[in-house]
Amino acid sequence: MDQSALWAQLERVLDPELDESIVRLGFVQRLEQDGSAVRVVLRLPTYWCSPNFAYLMADGVRRVLTELPGIEAVRVELEEHFASEEISSGVTSGRSFRELFPTEAQEELDELRCRFLVKGYASRLLVLVQALRSAGASDDELVESSLGQLEHTGDLAWLVLDDRRRGPVRGRMVERYLVRRAELGLPMLPESPLLLLADGQPITRERFNEELRHLRTTVINLRASTALCEALLQSRQQWWQSERKEVLP
Amino acid sequence: MITIDGQEVFVIDGHMHFWDGSPQNWRNQWGEAWIKCFYDYHLALSPKEAVWPFEKFMKYSADDLVRDLFLEGHVDMGIFNSTYLREFFTNGFNTHEQNYALVQQYPDRFILCGSFDPRWGEAGFDTFRRMVEQYPIRGLKLYTAEWYNGSRGWKLSDPMAYRYLELCRELGIKNIHVHKGPTVYPLSKDAFDVHDIDYAATDFPDLNFIVEHVGLPRLDDFCWIAKQEKNVYAGLAVASAFIATRPRYFAEIMANLLYWVGEDKILFGSDYAIWTPKWIVEAFARFELPEDLKQEYGVDLTPQAKRKILGENAARLYGIDIAAQKAKLAQDPIGQQLAAQAA
């Protein structure tokens, strides 16, 4: 099989906290295929990255790859993590997080995952609002528009008003918003409001600026964390490089 | 010494350490992994000229600390955020006992934090009392992600934690620094959560809770809590280190804190020796919020706000009269050395 199909699938696995693909974040160290068996090596920004998130990512890798026809066994190895062994062997054998950490894991991971889906949604919503605003949409237009007024063409999208349209904005941005909105089970009908908060409430004109400020705080947190994780992962590579030097003549 | 608008600023480093992360002190692989992870933080955000070799980073001397903070780092006083990690380090990582050696030498330069762990149970009450009696403990540093006897974390809202907070009242300890920062282990039961602070702050309105690392990577949750609770403060350690290599993020974090928390409730911290304070303090003194953020949030990082954040807020929490303290510090060995340097 062409490895690009495998990479494309891996692209779909997100760091739940950073709401970004593990491929883009550089967490995938190795991808090897041998017939119907695949081996993926993951390395996270720190040795201490929370095991629940580590599990979600490792398990996500297993799930998306086994979706592919012809792939029967997926071995996921989490490198240099304090719970490497539990997570690697647990995920490869398809065990749940609670089975792996029976005394410590109390909350279901779904709940945690959901909390971060909501934060990611906030980020995607804000990005959309900011893009449409800088493409000329007024705050009134944004709160009054419905989903059906979004129009995609190729990689571009517009907000269509009665007599004109606002845009273009990047299609991927709109796509990310819509995908997550559907994942959260929010209304997706053409007549549903364009802008919905994660609890399903529309953003009113009166609360527009305040809601935006809330969204911004969530987003700056997410971006700062992403910047930190990327920098940590980068400096983390030094330990392997120096170890390799010691091994090589 | 650093000046802002021509005026001398009194600087309290609200978060610093004197640790021993050397291999001799590693109890097991966790000790090694711990100090390496710290070093990654150091490399990730330090400007090139402030990067240390790993050898020095594992264990630095008292002379290094005095130079990096007071002689070169513009800091007047430091708050020892004692961190124990006895399950990773044979003698602990930087316990109050270790820090006390420096406190004894320069009593006016440091505020010493002790700690409690609710998992000590009632048997620990005496240990805690003794700590406060035997050492000049003025604040506490709590570390809810610490491993202990198979448990890998606790919450400030646990009933036994409340018993200890009551004991703090009795012993006259008012300032509680709580590590709520980058993820270290905590499993799903309390991962990514700063909400236990909310309960404790409401139930102990006479205590101050300084949330170290402003909850990053949970800045947003922290902001909502700090806005509601008068006695919740923002400790800038880690966030402050963004200032050199990620100034835009630093600006956005500051704009958020100024808006939600306010300039009276933010405390500077370098997290020394993860980062040295010199470059952070210098950059902070010069730092201006970008115009778009000022507009959007309606806040500004004025010279007055900077002075509060760098020292006045911490001084208020710890009952330090800055003028009197400065006079005292001018006379101590470090003050004399500084005077000699300036001459």
Image (tube, rainbow, N blue to C red):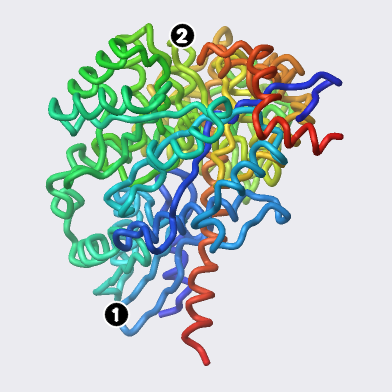
Is A109 placed left or right of B79 in the picture?
Answer: left
The three-letter code of the residue at mark 1 reads: Ser
Q: Is residue A131 visible?
A: no
The residue beneath circle 1 is: A36
Q: CA distance from mark 2 to mark 1?
A: 60 Å
Give the residue furthest to the bottom: A249
Is B104 placed left or right of B249 in the picture?
Answer: left
B194 in relation to B34, above or below: above
**Between residues B147 and B244, which one lies in front from this camera angle?**
B147
**Between residues B135 and A129, which one lies in front from this camera angle?**
B135
Mark number, residue A209: none
Tell me whether marks 2 and 1 sit on the same chain: no
Is B98 placed left or right of B263 in the picture?
Answer: left
Using a 10 Å C-alpha cutoff, classify the residue at mark 1 as few (fewer than 14 neighbours), some (14 to 19) or many (20 or more). Answer: some
Q: At 29% from the left edge and 74% from the top edge, which residue is drawn?
A: A71
Query: In the rendered image, which quarter contains the N terminus of chain A?
Result: bottom left
B45 in relation to B23, above or below: above
The residue beneath circle 2 is: B230
Q: Is residue A106 visible?
A: yes
Question: Residue B47 placed where, x, y %?
Answer: 70, 51
Q: At 51% from the left edge and 29% from the top edge, which residue is drawn?
A: B79
**Between residues B134 and B323, which one lies in front from this camera angle?**
B134
